Image (spheres, rainbow, N blue to C red):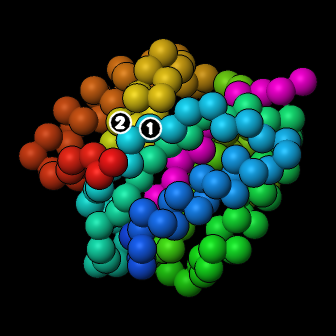
Amino acid sequence: MPTNAFIAAGSNLGNRLEHIRSAQRLVAETPEVKFLAGSAIHETMPQGGPPQGLFLNSVWKIETSLDPQALLKLLQSIEKKLGRVRAVSNGPRIIDLDLLDYDGQVVNEEGLTLPHPRLHERVFVLRPLSEVAPEWIHPVLKKRARELWVICHSRESGNPGFMQPQL
């Protein structure tokens, strides 16, 4: 039975827009996946890690027949195909695909935590998630995406972590 899931995409190396578009195309071309919606692409400041360039970020809503582990493996294979190398934690990356939510499930397994453990702390995820699914409810915190975005954004006021949408 198909299940809804949310994926965050980010890039801050090379042709950032092309990397995000290529990743979206590869996700959408997967037979077990139906692409439902995507947010605008936003340019954001890097959060944590070594000094690095600006990111482009987006969130996608999909429907899939893959289980959470298989979906995660698909995302990791797409990252690898597009040239992602995991050298430095929170370092610059060609593409970063994070599984944010899978049908509201709470999962704590080796290599997979759902919902994404830092989703509620990341303006660069919450703003685009709020565009795609403002009524989505965090399965642990029991707050809507738009509420979490307002809370997180107000915490970071004065921090220019968010810039204008690119497309």
Magenta region includes residue 5: yes
Choose top left, top right, bottom left or bottom right for residue 91.
Answer: bottom left
Q: Please indicate whether residue 125 sits to the left or right of residue 21 in the image.
A: left
Seen as rendered, the residue at the extreme right is 1
Tell me where the magenta segment starts and ends, as one range: 1-11
Residue 92, placed above or below residue 73:
below
**Left or right, residue 41 beside residue 60:** left
Query: Could you tell me which residue is drawn at 48 percent across and 74 percent down?
Result: 93
The reply, left or right, for residue 60 in relation to residue 166 is right
Q: Which residue is mark 2?
A: 127
Most distant residue in the left direction:
158
Q: Are marks 1 and 2 in contact (CB under 8 Å)?
A: yes
Q: Position of residue 32 (x, y in %)?
A: 85, 42
Q: Is residue 105 visible?
A: no
Q: Position of residue 135 (x, y in %)?
A: 48, 15
Which residue is drawn at the image coordinates 52% and 54% (left, top)? 9
Mark 2, secondary structure of its residue:
helix
**Which comes before the other along the chain, label 1 or label 2?**
1
Q: Which labelled disc corresponds to residue 39?
A: 1
Query: x%, y% of residue 132?
Result: 48, 29
In percent of width and height, residue 146 lies at 37, 22
Q: Residue at x 70, y 51 (%)?
A: 27
* Residue 62 badge: none
Q: How many marks?
A: 2
What secondary structure is marked by label 1?
Answer: loop
Q: Dividing the image into 4 quarters, which one contains the N terminus?
A: top right
Q: Nearer the viewer, residue 121 or 101?
A: 101
- In the displayed structure image, the side of residue 1 where residue 30 appears, left or right: left
